[in-house]
Image (cartoon, rainbow, N blue to C red):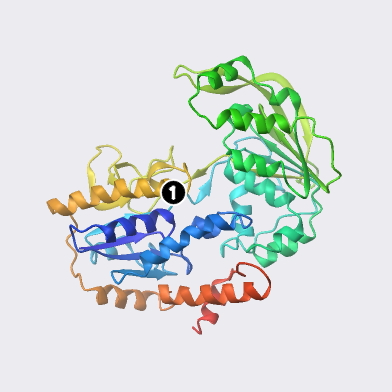
Amino acid sequence: MRVAIVGSGPAGFYAAGHLLKQQEFTVTVDMYDRLPTPYGLVRFGVAPDHEKIKNVTRVFDKVAAQPAFRFFGNVDIGKHITLDDLKRHYHQICFATGAQTDKQMGIPGEDLSGSHSATEFVAWYNGHPDYRDYEFDLTSKRVAVVGVGNVAVDVARILCRTIEELEKTDIADYALDALRDSKVKEVYMLGRRGPAQAAFTNPEVRELGELAGADTSVLPDEARLDPLSQAAVDESNDKTLPKKLEIIQSLVDQPSQGKPRKLIIRFLVSPVELVGNAEGRVTAMRLVKNALYKTESGGLRPKATDQFEELPVDMVFRSVGYRGVPVPELPFHDGWGTIPHDKGRVVEMETDKPVLGIYVTGWIKRGPTGIIGTNKLDAAETVQTMLADLGTGIVLQPATTDPAAVEKLVRERQPEFVSYEDWSRLNELETEKGKSQGRPRVKFTDVKEMMSALER
């Protein structure tokens, strides 16, 4: 049985691993990615100063080393190869395309110069080829990061790192140069709910409090729990929550240690407007103070009060959530930014009728939740569904199952496709260059440079 997986991030690799590990069927897997490099968000989303997290790629390399696996990088499904092409060569097709764009705040002034998506900034400093030419004005002195989730924490931390710390990472060279000249002095992280509801983990917030390049603080009034939050904490089974609150409380009224930057973590505030100058550039953010209320389901949600303030800032990064983008010819739930499914089996929106032979896994399936490891269980569910359909013969009927046929088609449509052997060579070149500089790697960030390195 031949399976195509579209997307080479954690979700795609975990699905490939589950398929190749099972003993019931003989399965071959071809993985496609529109970029020449694999690993998805592990390469382009994990912060450069969190190198240990990237060790998960060793697991993916073991999957790729299996004889029944092939990688077709630099091949864009929908451009070089169509969905109908895939249907003519595979019994099953699994999309693991992630959540490629971000949500907007939906407030006046969001399109002013100096207002950015945090996801764009993350992709930029991680060397994503699509974002290498983006520009961020790091002469800005005061920056607001809207959100207190993983991405927001990464953005705030990178802005506050010393250049000596960043020089030891695999951050893109052009980003390193830009950050070397950064004039950022104050960074605000803004959470719309209270400290008890903050999405960051204990290690993340502890790390923010131990930055070599920034004094970190929390306002006393915003660190104090309201009665509803205190009751929720008392009833919670989350054993890490009291420790998180203890760490946050420890940052209240911290005396300045004279570090070059300040990081201020705010709670119970929401941006309602970005204010600009005559040149159309952000100069301030208007905030409303929030209060929490209890929903019918028992959760705590923020609601605006009549208290406002204006925060002078030169640059804003919104980090209020990712969302998936539609895949041509497949159903799509626009409100959720996901492809509708039943345990990974794609279904029509109106009828819930299965779409023959098409499956999803990862963020395009469940939305942007969880950590890298969450994709392993998620992929296991999808693969179980795929195997059930293989067992009952409810699969596509490809015109040919010859592996050479699809490779011939790829070579015709995209002669510059990248195999896993090609990627391994690029990987060697990156790590060799990094070793000479005392860094994990120096990334290729331009597709043409990659092709040149491969002598294409």
**Residue 24 location, x and y as percent?**
18, 57
Q: How many marks?
A: 1
- Residue placed furthest toward the top: 227
- Residue placed furthest toward the left: 392
**Residue 340 location, x and y as percent?**
33, 42
**Residue 118 location, x and y as percent?**
62, 48
In this rendering, the answer to whether 245 lies above or below 374 is: above
**Residue 123 location, x and y as percent?**
59, 57
The amino acid pointed to by label 1 is Gly
Query: Which of the 4 quarters of the picture holds residue 337?
Result: top left
Q: Residue at x 69, y 33 (%)?
A: 273
Q: Quadrant of the N terminus?
A: bottom left
Q: Say left or right for 312 vs 64.
A: right
**Residue placed under numbered mark 1 in the picture:** 373
Q: Secondary structure at mark 1?
A: loop
In this rendering, the answer to whether 298 lies above or below 31 is: above
Q: Say left or right for 336 vs 273.
A: left
- Residue placed furthest toward the right: 258
In this rendering, the answer to whether 363 lies above or below 301 is: below
Q: Say left or right for 9 vs 153.
A: left
